[in-house]
Amino acid sequence: MAEVPSPQMTEQLDNEEVREILKNTTDLRQYSRQIEKEFKEVENKSIEDYIAESQNIANLHNQINDCDDVLERMENMLMSFQSVLNNISTEITQLQRKSVSMSLQLTNRQSVKAQLSQFIEDMAVSEEMINIIMETPVTERDFSTQLNVLNHKLSLVKELSFKESKSTSDVSDVLQKLRLKAMAKIRSYLLEQIYKFRKPMTNYQIPQNAMLKHKFFFEFILSNERHVAQEICSEYIDTMGKIYYSYFKSYSTRLTSLKFEESCTKDDLMGIEDNASKGLFSKTTSLKHKSTIFTIGKRGDILNQQLEAPIIVPHAQLKNRYTAEALFRSEQYALVDNACREYLFVTEFFMVRGTQAQDLFNQIMGKTLTLMIKNLETSIHDCFDTIAMFLCIHLIFRYQLMCHKRCVPALDKYWDSLQAVIWPRFELVFRLNIQSIHDCDPTKFNKELGPHYITRRYAEFSAAIVGISEHFPNELVSRLLLELQNEVECFILRMAAIFPTRKDQLIYLINNYDLVLGVLMEHTRDNSKEAEAFREQLNSRSAEYVEEILAPHFGGIIQFVKECEHFFEKEQMDELRKQERRSLALVASFSANWKKSLEELNREVLLSFPSLLTGSQLLQLALASLVQYYHRFHKLLTPNARAQLTNIHVVMVEIKKYKSNY
């Protein structure tokens, strides 16, 4: 099919044709007639074509009419379907509404049915429950089960009675009778268990465990008859209070008989003169020898390995004797064990917490705790064993921590009371020891260069106190230790002053400082304040001692170095040359005597100190100082004098012979 030209294209073609005609100067009228003729021919041809296709056009018209009929029928059919679907949708909506309504009705009926069924079940009293409550022993499982059911029914009836429900009147009488019967049986059972505690040699944990197994019994009584619950509670308090008081009173008395017969007195203070005639443990029941009074030894194990050891059984240990802290530990651990178990039982069985639990515990254990505090006051009144008291204080710290780990705060006031008893006595005796050292008269002691026995006492005692208090530091203890340390340092200086020569004084000071430092290092941390203080004193006195022992043998060289070294530093070589004669004499003297001097130095140092390690260290310190002075002396010599000086390597080889293996 030919493409129809657009109006723009037609107009363009016409314009071109007009321009062509004008260009050719053709006559327009002639040209118009020609065009009309052509149009006529085209029209005739079109009519012929239309006539030729008239049959097809008629058929097409008939087909279009048939299609219109078909579409009209389809439209009618779809309209009918739409009407039917609208009706179905309306019916479905109505059915949904009915379904929701019926579901809601069903839910409401089921809810009412469940509640009504539960209510009927809760209110009904079965024959089985009546028989079990009336006939079955309380220890049977069925009785506990039905008791729970009865308790629930009683609670429900009580609640409904406030709402004036008529249904309660049908079962109230039966339930009250069952309640009274159950109460009577439970009361009888619990009192029977409590009375078992009173039998001699009874392990009261057994009836306690039986009561805990049926702890709901007390809950039932408490919720239904408070005066009966109070009766049971009072009976338990009275019984257990007497049992604990009787047990600990007897146990404390029997423990007291296991103490050492001869204990520390005011004559056993640190500064009191030691009487050698007493000997070491003159009796097996004595703790009087001062080397044991101020030494902790294995007594510190009581805070660690023996903290939870089995308690002492007096009748099985009649031949043994114990220190005060060992008896204290046994008694307090027995209390901790019993008190913690009792507190946990009370809170669980009687269902009390906080202040109520504390009050109930105090009613049971109060008299016993008061007795134990008074016993401690009596025993500590004449105690002069400071280490024992300090161990007891730290036992209290650890047992209080143990109670907290067991969730038992009930003994906190008791521990505070024990602390209030021990601390003043501990401080008093501690200060008596300090005063005893202050009052010492150095002239009454023998002039011995070795460590003084008071220094040894202090070292052992201070190490013991510092070692014990590492985990629980205390400001008062630190202050007392500092006062004691200052007093001991003053005593050591006073004792050193009785020796006529400075060298002997230094030997005495070094021996005593070395002893204290060695003991402290063995039993405490290296960085303790006490160890640091004595380390400084020891280093200072050691340096001074080295100068003292070098002076008789090499004093000329040392003096020359000290006097002439500043000439070398200021480069005043003329002044050094003026000292050549003096230096030559020193060189000659050194070359002739240095080996002999080293031997005498070695013998003198090792004989002056009982500790081979200390003597060896001081000798090495002296030799090192000698080598330094020798180097400095060598620098100050003129070439002539330096040539005559013994070679430093020869000196070093000889010095190495005195190197110790300690």
Image (tube, rainbow, N blue to C red):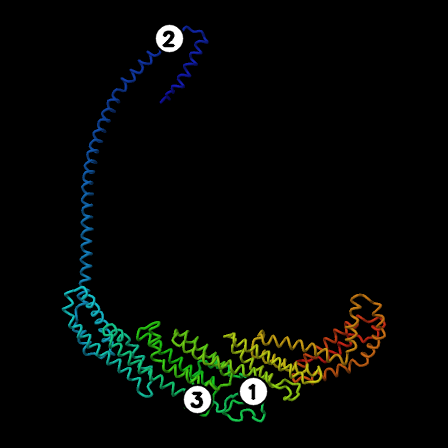
Residue 304 in sight from this viewpoint? no
What's the residue type where badge 1 is placed? Ser
Label whose residue precedes the other's in the sequence (3 or 1): 3
| Residue type pointed to by label 2 | Ser
The disc labelled 3 sits on which kind of residue? Thr
Instruction: Tell me the element at label 3.
Output: helix
Q: Nearer the viewer, mark 3 or mark 2?
A: 3
Look at mark 1 in the image and give the residue it sits on. Answer: 291
Q: How far from the left and from the top, in percent, is residue 484?
A: 57, 79
Q: CA distance from mark 3 to mark 1?
A: 24 Å
Judging by the rendered image, the residue that carries numbered circle 2 is 32
Q: Is residue 461 left or right of residue 24?
A: right
Residue 156 in view here:
yes
Calculate the distance from the C-alpha at mark 3 to the C-alpha at mark 2: 159 Å
Circles 3, 2 touching at the beta carbon (< 8 Å): no
Q: Which mark is residue 171?
A: none
Q: Quadrant of residue 234?
A: bottom left
Residue identifier under label 3: 256
Pick whichever of labels 2 and 1 is earlier in the sequence.
2
